[in-house]
Amino acid sequence: MKGTAMLRSSRVRPYAITGGRTIARMPLLLETLVSVPDYDLMVHQMLVAESRDIYALCRSVQSIAEISAALDMPLGVVRVLVSDLADDGRLRIHPTAVHAGVPEHMLLERVLRGLQTIKH
Amino acid sequence: MVSRPSSTELSPTAISTKIVIAGGFGAGKTTFVRSISEIEPVTTEALMTEASQDFDDLAATPEKITTTVAMDFGRVSLDQELALYLFGTPGQDRFWFLWDDLIRGALGAVVLADPRRLADCFPAVEYFENVPEAPFIVALNCFDGILPFELDDVRAALAIGPEVPLLTCDARDTASAVYTLTELVRYAMNFAGPPALV
């Protein structure tokens, strides 16, 4: 068994951290933003390595996809760890526009306005 | 890449939305994302097991969890409270199942097509025709600015309805990419129907 574990790439290892779970408790879309509302160094130090990296990174607002890319961590693992950190009140999960109750028309108008401010 | 003064930091109350950039391999998806993103397009990896867990016994085939697929994406901060993400679909056909994850919650999709290899975008068009809740438009990425066919002929070849916007673009050009997204959003507005009466 030990031999098998050593043959595997390091990419697989976070599954040990997620307790074998591959599904987050709450729906986390690729673009879902998360942030740390009150960064606490004590919390940072008590977290396991992968969660600690996410906790530190999310001092500025990040999306699930950005966390995955920045930490070179598979999306499924990011989802589970983010979900756990949020359960413990360490991370805040921002609603996406569709879940924030923004009426679709207002959202589209806002996107249109935003696009028009992009400098070419 | 687009440089924007307000793009560095999103507000702690920011929300997000996304648009999917689909199309065949080499249609210019990453170029399109790059020409409008304020961050260098980055790649994230999804695991095969995320979609196949229902029918794969992971315990029996643990090596399967190492199968990954790359997706490129970029970001535009439309304002400090709203981030728009652009996700390019994985090029390989065998990762179709990931499209469901990509399209979930999206405002809509741009199907990019290389006019010289039009057939490459057929699977993407077919996919979005079967996702009625997601509006899509087709943008022909004309690298040299020349479209060798009439747009109507392309529409007929793609077998898309008259209501689906079909336009040309240059994926390398920011203004053209912005225009393409604008057309999608305008279409989505009609698609969503008039605002509800209050």
Image: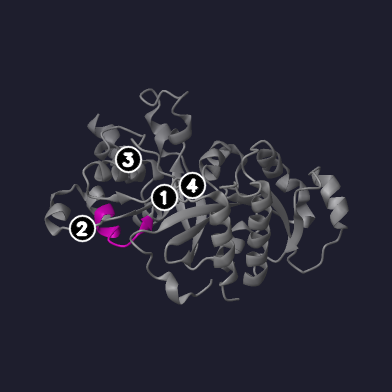
Disc 2: which residue: A38
- The mark found on residue A80 in the picture is 3
Disc 2 is placed on an element classified as loop
Between label 1 and label 4, give the one nearer the viewer: 4
**Residue underneath mark 4:** A98
Q: Earlier in the sequence, mark 3 or mark 4?
A: 3
Q: Which residues are magenta?
A: A54-62
Q: How far across and down, in percent of the image, does residue B7 sit? A: 44, 70
Q: Residue furthest left?
A: A42
Precedes in sequence: disc 1 or disc 4: 1
**Nearer the observer, disc 2 or disc 3?**
2
- Where residue A7 appears, x then y in whole percent? 31, 38
Judged by depth in the image, the label closer to the viewer, 2 or 4, is: 4
First along the sequence among labels 2 and 3: 2
Q: Which of the marked residues, 1 or 3, is nearer the chain's N terminus? A: 1
- Depth check, mark 1 against mark 3: the one in front is 1
